[in-house]
């Protein structure tokens, strides 16, 4: 019996020789909770307005593989944001606070990162992400 070259190449690719990601993709059944702060305090509706923040963008990126999940137009004045279907294991949490510049174009006003572990249950306390001013800021 002769095997067709396509079958052989497919088998090699499936075994990891030439696969685009040599790492396994972590399962995306993790749960993580986070909060964001500015100067150590949670953002209130008034503070969001004063900082000219319209909404938040949140990304959860696996530190052990190519998996990630992201959300946009998240309410600014939350003290806890829980996410399901996150990559399981060690993750990088990225939070951006978006507003508009003087011309009305969307811009990133504040940004922060933190690491966490996404498990199969929500944590008791959220991982805190401190937001800082962007040096290129909104003009």
Image: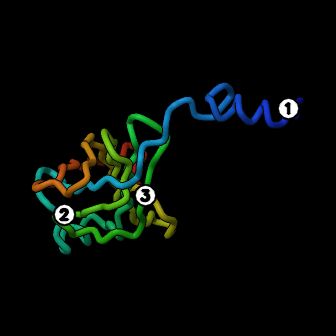
Taking the image as shown, residue 10 lies to the left or right of residue 34, namely right
Separation of marks 3 and 2 at Cα, in angstroms:
16 Å
Taking the image as shown, residue 99 lies to the left or right of residue 128, namely right
Q: Position of residue 66 (x, y in %)?
A: 49, 40
Query: In this picture, is 106 found above or below 32?
Result: below
Report which residue position mark 2 lands on. Answer: 80
* Residue count near mark 2 (Cα–Cα under 10 Å), binned few <14, some 14–19, many ≥20: some
User: Which residue corresponds to the image point at 35% horizontal and 48% vertical from the top-left?
Assistant: 94
Taking the image as shown, residue 80 lies to the left or right of residue 93, namely left
Report which residue position mark 3 lands on. Answer: 70
| Quadrant assignment for the N terminus | top right
Separation of marks 2 and 1 at Cα, in angstroms:
56 Å
| Quadrant assignment for the C terminus | bottom left
Q: Which mark is residue 16?
A: none
Report which residue position mark 1 lands on. Answer: 3
Marks 3 and 1, the one that precedes in the sequence: 1
Front position in the image: 134 or 119: 119
Q: Secondary structure at mark 3?
A: strand
């Amino acid at each position: 019996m002769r095997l067709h070259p396509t079958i052989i190449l497919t088998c090699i690719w499936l075994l990891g020789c030439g696969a685009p990601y040599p790492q396994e993709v972590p399962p995306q059944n993790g749960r993580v909770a986070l909060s964001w702060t500015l100067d150590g305090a949670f953002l209130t509706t008034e503070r969001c307005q004063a900082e000219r923040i319209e909404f938040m963008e949140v990304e959860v990126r696996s530190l052990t593989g190519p998996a990630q999940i992201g959300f946009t137009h998240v309410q600014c004045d939350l003290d806890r944001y829980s996410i399901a279907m996150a990559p399981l294991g060690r993750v990088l949490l990225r939070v951006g606070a978006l507003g508009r510049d003087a011309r009305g174009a969307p811009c990133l006003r504040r940004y922060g990162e933190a690491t966490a572990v996404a498990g199969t249950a929500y944590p008791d306390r959220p991982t805190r992400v401190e937001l800082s001013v962007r040096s290129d800021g909104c003009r």
